[in-house]
Image (cartoon, helix red, strand yellow):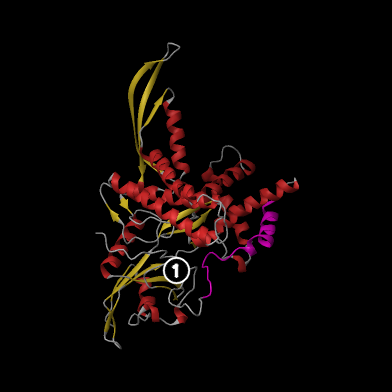
Amino acid sequence: MSERMSVQSPAYAKVLLGLPWAIPLADWPSELLSAFPRGISRHTVRLISAGGMVLAVKEIGETVAYHEYRTLKRLRELDIPCVKPVAVIAQRTNDARAEELTPCLVTEHLEFSLPYRDVFSRSLSPATVNKLIRALAVLLVRLHLANFYWGDVSLSNTLFRRDADAFSAYLVDAETGEFHAPLSEGRRLYDVEVARVNIIGELMDLQAGGLIDGDVDVIALGNAVDAMYHELWGLMTEELVVEGDAFKQIAEHIEKINSLGFDIGETQITHETTRRAEDGSTVDVYRVSIEPSVFSTGFHSRKLKKLTGLDVQDRQAQRLLSEMEVYRALHHSDTHSLEDVALDWLVNRYEPVVALTPASLRTKLEPAQVFHEILDHRWFISENEKRYVSLEEAAKSYFDTILPARPDEARIYTALHPDDPDEPDDPDDLDDPDIPDSS
């Protein structure tokens, strides 16, 4: 074996050593391949099932492969949502043909994730478009707060996971990404413009394919990423000028930041001036600078994990925390804190309902998403039938009538077309242009 491996963890080594690296990726045996929803790629990509893992393998130049591998590692260290890098396989040779083979970047498949095209194959509404674009805008803000320039922002280079009634976005392709300290405004705004142009093009493709109604203004939808991004960026970074009851206004501002899943760092409050109001009273004016905490996004998910150990998406966590508050009000006195009732809620409320999920349906959605949808289903039944509905009754109805019709999102398999074996579907490398290393 002449290959050189850079492996993220020894846990992967045994699986990787058993793969046929001396064969061009396009010629790998079909028994290794997993079929997923198709992503457009100019690289040869395969989704591999081996050792109980699903791995994305992409043939790519060595310099770019190592750059992307290191970039993804650093992004994950900063708690930025992205796919997990596993290894770079370099110095591959095909002894039978006496030729060098292109190196490979290996990443983990992100469970319960969806490419944007798969989302649109199930929901055609402009509201869904807005949810995806907003998720991408939030991801872009998080990247820019970490001084990361993406360079190729698009729906295609992103994976989406359901997050209660919204989506969370994960970076997939980091070939053109770079860290800058600090990130210039020019690079930041260029990222936003690239996102806008790419999204419009992607939505036009969907519209041409009949996945979006022809009457929908996809240009306006694509332009929305610019407005959403600047709204979020302003909320995170601009100074706040407040008058009068400054602390109430600051608290409301921080709550709005937290509602988006961001925590805050240092807060500086400066007494700017005192002015006289029309009624003759004096009014204090304060200038407030709030530093977003780049390394501690996921405000609600971190809080829930601390209380219960559950590791879920941020909006899911927000919904579960709200349900925990209701449980506390109904079953405990006012003297009990959320910390006091968290274990009781977990053992007697959340886990019993999730455990009711039939074994055959457990790969449909993440448990926290199932619980969220059961809560919505209970409200729907109660509103329609004008009566109280227990959580257990709602769960049974949901498992009987709603969940069976949903596709498996843990690993969404589709059959490979026998006449087109060269590009299996790959959610970890979507619309991946062959751009040279930008460093």
Q: Residue furthest bottom?
A: 96
Give, as a single range, the part of the protein colored magenta.
389-415
Residue 391 % position (x, y):
67, 52
Quadrant occupied by the N terminus? bottom left
Q: Residue at x 43, y 43 (%)?
A: 227
Q: Is residue 381 above or below residue 173?
A: above
Tell me which amino acid carries mark 1. Asp
Q: Is residue 212 above or below residue 54?
A: above
Mark 1 residue element: loop
* Residue 305 visible, this orientation: no
Q: What number of labels is visible?
A: 1
Q: Which of the 4 quarters of the picture holds residue 104?
A: bottom left
Residue 404 % position (x, y):
64, 64
Q: Is residue 275 above or below residue 89?
A: above
Residue 306 % position (x, y):
46, 50
**Is 33 on the left-hand or right-hand side of 238?**
right
Is residue 60 one of those drawn in magenta? Answer: no
Quadrant occupied by the C terminus? bottom left
Q: Residue at x 30, y 67 (%)?
A: 65
Local packing at callout 1 (Cα closer than 10 Å; few below 14, some 14-19, many 20+) is many
Q: Residue furthest top?
A: 280
**Is 69 on the left-hand or right-hand side of 112?**
left
From the image, tell me which residue sits under label 1. 426
Q: Residue at x 45, y 50 (%)?
A: 222
Q: For this rendering, which residue is in front, 325 or 59?
A: 59
Is residue 414 one of those drawn in magenta? Answer: yes
* Residue 394 visible, this orientation: yes
Residue 426 % position (x, y):
44, 68
